[in-house]
Image: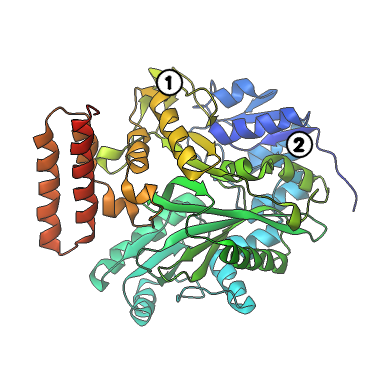
Amino acid sequence: MKKRQVKRLLIANRGEIALRIIRACRELDVTSVAVFSDVDRRSLHVIQADEAYPLGGSTPRDSYLNQSRIIQLASEYAVDAIHPGYGFLAENPDFADAVRSAGILFVGPSGAAIRSMGDKTSARKMAKQLGVPTITGTVEPIQDVSEALKRANEIGFPILLKAAAGGGGKGMRAVRTEKEFEKAFRMAQSEARGAFGDDRVYMEKYLDSPRHIEMQILADEHGNVVYLGERECSVQRRHQKVIEETPSTAVNDELRRQLGSAAVGLTKAAGYSNAGTMEFLLDTEGKFYFLEMNTRLQVEHPVTEEVTGIDLVKQQIRVAEGEPLPFGQEEIKIRGHAIECRICAEDPEENFMPSTGVLTRYTLPEGRIRVENGFREGDEISIFYDSLMAKVISWGETRAAAVTAMKRALSDFSIEGVKSTIPFCRFVLETRDFLEGDIDTCFVEKHFIPDLLKSKSSNDGEQLAAAIAVVRIAVQRTGALEPLSGADQELSRWKDSRREGFR
């Protein structure tokens, strides 16, 4: 197979992922070409890139989703390849095909592979054919609400509505009763249409308290596929990840081999090349079920890089050039433990509502810590794009060491001007169940009480007790008992820390 050398690479993205790709380009001696919207004219990725050109517009649709404009710029400035990052056009098969039709390398899978595995219903069909366990649900997407309700009743509530064309929690709704269904279905369709330009929705049986485990794969154009270990992604809000780690406390060597084997089998069956991630749910009995494939680089890819020593972005570019993978499965070694915290411009005290404004203070942690950052002091967090500002990644020989390093880094990360998820991440890292590795996708609902964040900074112990008392009464009225233990544990631990002089 003829090798194609990448000398000039256009990054069809913004923020921290654009800067991550710029760094890889520098280390490969590749010229980085940024594109930017009107809002991002003075953004960090524009300044750091070797070259930068305007897309125009402010909204995603008018800028980073403008396929024709991106390809026009790529052709005009003679780039060899386009890297889509994640989000925006990263999982759009038509864009992948259009890039290649323009004679430009697409740093990612083929359009056909994205259609096969990026489409959630198509991926589920393939998994079933290969004998990989899947959750009970619809095989084909449904657009008619009456038909959808009929199928929901056949599956049995609670069910989970999901966008067929994308991920990241967008277009996803948990529905527990028939009464809630129509409104939730319409909302899922609307959100899917807005995020992916595709309102197809499918559904699956909702599992109670599963773990969200994913397996990173790398595949070249010569038929070689390896898996690089799992990531634990169970700490989520609104079906979107906040804290990820590897390895998972719930995965032993045998289960890792089974997950890896399923991931490699699906990758080969799809004729897939480049980086990708197979996502699974792990139930309370240790049984796993294929969920979906993300046909792109993941936000949480740094934790895998930290424990394997493999630069995934560089490998993506080399695979796009036609290079074979430089290692086999037996050469992949996992060393130590890594944790990532997503630092988003959101207010945890107000149900993680987006927070916008100017960063009047923005000081990154230093020392032996990795920060994937997209902003600087004085930048504005706008209403137009994703709330992710940065990612903090810690590594340690043990999980406990990685947790300690992360807590120190979060304490050193100073943000003013907008609210952030830093207080929430610190809350999680101090929670007993997290420290013991006892986590699932309902972790936030079970343990997190927004008022605890306010109360922990208060000198009034009664305020904390009152906040938890309110939650206890509400829980008793609804009959949902699970959150009580988490609240009681936090109250007890808070009292202990008070006695030690810590707030």
Q: Nearer the viewer, residue 27 or 11?
A: 27
Q: In the shown orientation, is residue 214 left or right of residue 80?
A: left
**Rendered image quadrant of residue 120:** bottom right
Q: In the shown orientation, is residue 177 left or right of residue 420?
A: left
For label 1, the SS is strand
The tag on residue 426 is: none
Residue at image x 56%, y 66%?
A: 255
**Rendered image quadrant of residue 271:** bottom right
Residue 290, percent from left and from top: 53, 68
Q: Quadrant of the C terminus?
A: top left
Q: Which residue is mark 2?
A: 75
Q: In the shown orientation, is residue 279 left or right of residue 322?
A: left
Q: Nearer the viewer, mark 1 or mark 2?
A: 1
Q: Earlier in the sequence, mark 1 or mark 2?
A: 2
Q: CA distance from mark 1 to mark 2?
A: 37 Å
Residue 378, percent from left and from top: 44, 17
Q: Nearer the viewer, residue 206 or 250?
A: 250
Under mark 1, the amino acid is Tyr
For label 2, the SS is helix
Under mark 2, the amino acid is Ser
Of all residues shown, which one is farthest toward the right?
Answer: 2
**Up-down relation of residue 216 to residue 358 (above or below):** below
Residue at image x 49%, y 35%?
A: 391
Residue 442, percent from left and from top: 34, 57
Residue 136 seen in the figure: yes
The tag on residue 362 is: 1
Q: Nearer the viewer, residue 375 or 250?
A: 250
Residue 66 seen in the figure: no
